[in-house]
Amino acid sequence: MPHKELVHTLRGLVGASQVLCEGDLSAYELDWRGRERGKALAVIRPGSTAEVAAVVKACAAAGVSMVPQGGNTGMVVGSTPDASGEQVVISLGRMNAVRTLDADNLTITVEAGCVLQNLHTVCDAAGLLFPLSLASQGSCTIGGNLGTNAGGTQVVRFGNTRDLCLGLEVVTPQGAIWDGLTGLRKDNTGYDLRHLFIGSEGTLGIITAAVMKLYPAPRAKMTALVALPSLQAAVALLGLAHAHLGAGLTGFEVMGQFALSLVHKHFPQQRVPFFQTVPYCVVLEHSDTESEAHARNQLETLLEAAVAKGCAVDAVVAENIAQARALWHIRESIPLAQAKEGLNIKHDISIAVSRIPDFVAQAEVALAHSHPGIRLVNYGHLGDGNLHFNVQAPEGADAQAFLRDEEGPINAVVYALVDAFNGSISAEHGIGSLKREKLVAHKSPVALDMMRAIKAALDPHNLMNPGRMLKPGGTHSDSATH
Ligand code: FAD
Ligand code: 2HG
Ligand code: ZN
């Protein structure tokens, strides 16, 4: 079917105003980091699962490939079309309803386009907690969170998005609807299909709705910003926090001095304590089911023990919700501050927590030797062993040229060390287009073969987000060449 005819068919299926072909489509075609601009044949905005299924069937019949898109906040260029002008973007933004909240079952059923922040608002109003928290939560969607298996700042207690999902509704690459919205906590009836789609980055089908787990809201939350003498001290503090707070430890985010200095520079209205005096700070959050007084007491006991053991030098404890928000806001502002500083190289890596100080020490030495002058923006979810070990061009350098010439060599240094430490090159952001080649180089041939077999079985014509995550037509022998 020629493209004109397909567009005509799609207009008939979802309404002419929901098929965008002209005008400024940057919001759908340019990735959040500004790394790549694609060109869509059309952007389709279906309003229901039945419409998604009909759109997929029409595209599949025409042999046109599809790119599922949520809030387009992904970090690895996975939700925007390629430059061919031959792919359609299927944006889930209009499918944003909360279908049901079951307080007794502690579950909520939402459509994929529901913005994460809106999910929080609904749960807060019901006195319940949906823990997934990302700095992008004002724009990212639950479908995108599931598509990437997003992490965020509460994983240390509640796990990744995968751990929060009890069921999915999915439109397959053939346009069939799989209703797996059971909301059951136990169901051993064969392969757990939900886990195939979570983290599949839109390559196996389109998630249209999900059942997500809820928790009772805690009685009190206490937040502290802790000043540390070293990264080793941060790991020691984490151990102490686990021991003192148990399941009450809900956030543990580390921030290096340069990362904090970028927040100070680009958001001067924010007060950033300690960054001029210590190499690292941690935002630590304690949630308590008893009372605020109990929570404060537990946190203060922990901090006193940490100072006594030399793994903290100072701390501020938020006195109220506004102060807690302000401390979290410092942490959440780092990605934006880094973007304001200029294009940068991101390494979203995970390493066993105990080995992180050694990894960072070795990586700093190796990069200082290979690329003198580069600036390391090191921060992240230390409680999960996940660092954002990012690299900013030397002061005053042309960031575009730096990326063009140095991204490959810098990645080679960092990822060789990640391999040596038995770590992962993508802890939470996924693979997308940006890390596709690296996946082949760093994943075992057996794992790659199984991944390709799954892709071929579910999407034999390679129409769902083709070329993302997996190289089309690649075989395990590719890995020998990298
Ligand atoms: P998109 O960017 O639109 O899509 C992401 C991927 O999911 C694409 O491959 C897309 O094809 C696929 N997809 C989208 N919707 C669907 C669907 N309905 N069905 C199937 N596939 C789909 N990520 C973290 O993990 N942790 C963080 O702490 C974090 N912080 C961030 C902070 C900032 C400031 C920003 C800009 C981003 C951050 N991210 C973080 C990255 C990003 O927000 C997450 O990856 C998020 O899950 C993407 O959601 P989205 O709706 O924007 O998805
Ligand atoms: C975060 O933790 C996000 O803030 C973004 O995952 C990380 O910008 C980054 O490198
Ligand atoms: Zn992160």
Image (cartoon, helix red, strand yellow):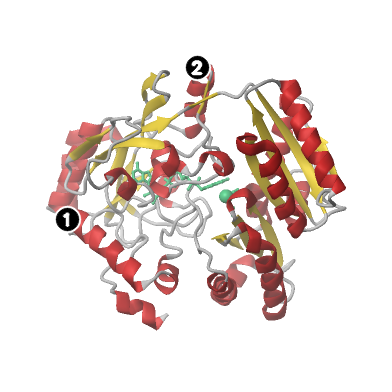
Q: Amino acid at mark 1?
A: Gly
Residue 377: x %, y % from top left: 68, 59
Helix, strand or loop status at disc 1: loop
| Residue identifier under label 2 | 126
Vertical comparison of 298 with 291: above or below: below
The answer, for residue 402, to whether it is visible in the render is: yes
Residue 387: x %, y % from top left: 61, 57
| Residue identifier under label 1 | 63
> In the picture provided, is 24 more to the left or to the right than 260?
left
User: If you read the primary sequence from the N terminus, does the residue marked by circle 1 or circle 2 appear first?
Assistant: 1
Helix, strand or loop status at disc 2: loop
Q: Residue at x 73, y 24 (%)?
A: 294
Closer to us: 46 or 413: 413
Q: Residue furthest bottom?
A: 481
Vertical comparison of 78 with 112: above or below: below
> In the picture provided, is 199 more to the left or to the right than 255?
left
Vertical comparison of 467 with 373: above or below: above
